[in-house]
Image (cartoon, helix red, strand yellow):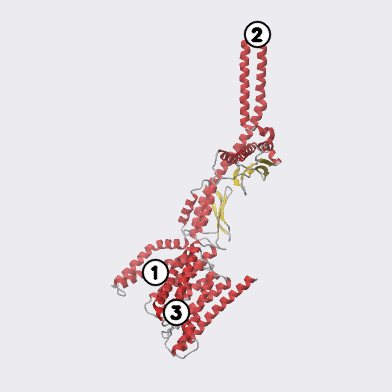
Amino acid sequence: MKPDLSDRTLVLAARAAAAAGVLSCVAVIPLHRWTTARAEITDLYLADLVLGTVWPAVGALVASRSPRNRAAWLLLLTSLIGPYLLLSHYAAIDALIRPLPGAAFGAWVAAWGFAPYWLCVPLLPVLFPDGRPPSRRWGLFAKAVTAAGGAAALAAMFHPGGTDVSPVVVNPLGVETLAVPLGAVTMAGSYSTLLVGTLGGVACLVGRGRRATGAERDQLQWLMLGGLVMGVCLAFAGLTLAGGLLPELALSAGLFALPASIVVAVLRHRLFDIEAVLGRSVIYTLLCGFVLAVYALAVIWLGRLAVGSPLGYLLVGGAAVAVAAGHGTVQRWVELLLFGHRRDPYAVVSRVGRQVAPASEPVEALRRLTDALRRELEVPYVAFTGPSAEAASGEPRHGWHTVPCSALGQDLGELHVGLRQPGERLLPQEREAVDEVAGRAAALAYAAGLVQDVASSRSRIVAAREEERRRLRADLHDGLGPVLAGTAHQLDALARRIDRAGHEEWAGQLRGLRDRVKTAVGDLRTVVQGLRPAVLDQLGLPGALRELVNGYETPACSYLIAPECAELPAAVEVAAYRIASEAVGNGVRHSAAGSLRLLAEVSEGFLVLTVEDNGCGLPARPRAGVGLGSMRERAEEVGGRLDLLPVPGGGTRVRAVLPVKE
């Protein structure tokens, strides 16, 4: 309950501050009319009233939704403008019309009460929308701007001289002996915050807007649009040499545009296609500014063009032609600055292709493709689904846009591009890039299917080979071997009989034939042993695995072998035995382990073989030796895989997963 109470307190405080600022601005209007009817003071500007009413009201709105958002309290800082204006008029009445109690405090506030504006403009782009700087570097920037603005406000509190409301109203706490350094600090601090700080804030806003996704991206782009309108209006008001109502209205409109854009960003950030509006606004602002700047420079610097002169029209026409010729280039640069590469389909496809190129096989290439496309389009989710391959990057948030993938006349899957927000539609440039990438994904899926077919064919060939070897071994061992051995015995008996008959020469020849047959029997046994480990036929796979770990004292070996391992395809039996033999040998010879365990089980159509020890573990960079390569190759031959993993606490786990069914 305590955090809720604190949040309610913050909301009430924000609303109270905003109400105080707005009521002060409302009260100062009749007070200004009454004062100007009796004395001469500075005009009350509409821009000050907009700043003192709209900005704190928007701050209270943001605080009501997120009480701990520092951007809200930055906007609420402008609620001091109303009391500043009210106290300034109070001090002016005291100095020019009649004495009033406490007027010295009003005169002191009049000397520095405008300072909150110095901080709001540069810091708002850094803190909006969540109230936190995007990085530690920008956090330091915000602190530096705050320090500069605070130093300027502190110096203004003690700077002697008149105030904005009237030269007669002077700072009662002004220190005459420090007038020059205090004035320098005030000027340096104010200009550094308003100029350098604002430029830094704009850079932060643009960079953050390019990296953001979803609702945050839309909110930042609304702030960009409001800042652009504000900048154009302030520039128009500043460049207008003559005073009057029009510059005042432009300045007020600019100060109104920024908080208005924040309201839309907070409440209805999906109101329009903000990217299109923002991009076109920036482009046309730059182009129009270029034309006006060309003409203004010619008029001011050359001093040769009179209003309506043919040369002036020619110069403006040339600038317009240059604008028309460079419109495409400016558009590309602006979109690259604001939105990155995702609005340029060719750049997206090119960058995705460069990140896919290092892949060593099609499935890895598909994973790289989904990762790269998600980063380039700055979407939360990209996935490819198909019968031959699947790959995904990120997590879907608000659904996805689906693009069919086909190659060589075959439908090979679908490419899913996650939406940044509910109901979003991809831009035409983004759809064009996705369609092109979908074609590449289809080609990779086709290649993955071919690789899968080759691997499956290889597995079937290996299985057929091992089954044939098992049959040949049985035939040779049980058929041809005994026949040859019997023939050798018969030749030996015949040689003895011929020798007893006195034909020693013939007997010697028969003994030679007998020896060659015995040699052939030995060679045949060697061939039989090479076709398949004899222990598998003698004991079966479970017995052969038990024999591998029996008889060791160090390490102490144990095993757990499921009964289902007794009836497996020949290829799987041979691969499992060879892998287990190599893994147990490595554990005994190289791991310095105290215990070693062998596990074998059949689960969901796979034989899972694990050899685990508690030895020295894997080196930081294990070398792929002959044994490890042989184990991995035997696993892959039958369509399985081999994993070499560290054991928590020290040790190594060799895990082979081998399919036992087609």
The residue at 51%/75% (across/down) is: 77
State the residue position of label 1: 288
Q: Nearer the viewer, residue 357 or 662?
A: 357
| SS for dot 1 | helix
Q: Secondary structure at mark 2?
A: loop
Give the residue type that dot 3 points to: Phe
Check the image and name the residue furthest to the front: 177
Residue 313 placement (x, y as % from top left): 32, 70
Question: Which residue is located at x 62 percent, y 35 percent?
Answer: 464
Q: Quadrant of the N terminus?
A: bottom right
- Type of amino acid under label 1: Cys
* Mark toward the viewer: 2 or 3: 3
Q: Tell me where residue 489 sits by quadrant.
A: top right
> With respect to residue 280, does 107 lie above or below?
below
Which residue lies at the image location 53% right of the left edge and 70% below the top edge? 70
Q: Secondary structure at mark 3?
A: loop
In terms of depth relative to the viewer, which is nearer, 22 or 170?
Answer: 170
Q: What residue is disc 2 on? A: 502
Q: Nearer the viewer, residue 79 or 324?
A: 79
Left or right of 507 on screen, residue 360: left
Distance in Å between CA atoms under marks 3 and 1:
44 Å
Looking at this view, name the residue that lies furthest to the top.
502
Residue denoted by label 3: 158
Q: Inspect the image, locate mark 2, and give the three-letter code of the amino acid beneath it.
A: Gly
Q: Is residue 388 left or right of residue 326?
A: right
Which badge, 1 or 2, comes first in the chain's sequence?
A: 1
Vertical arrangement, residue 556 with respect to residue 434, above or below:
above
Q: Are marks 3 and 1 in contact (CB under 8 Å)?
A: no
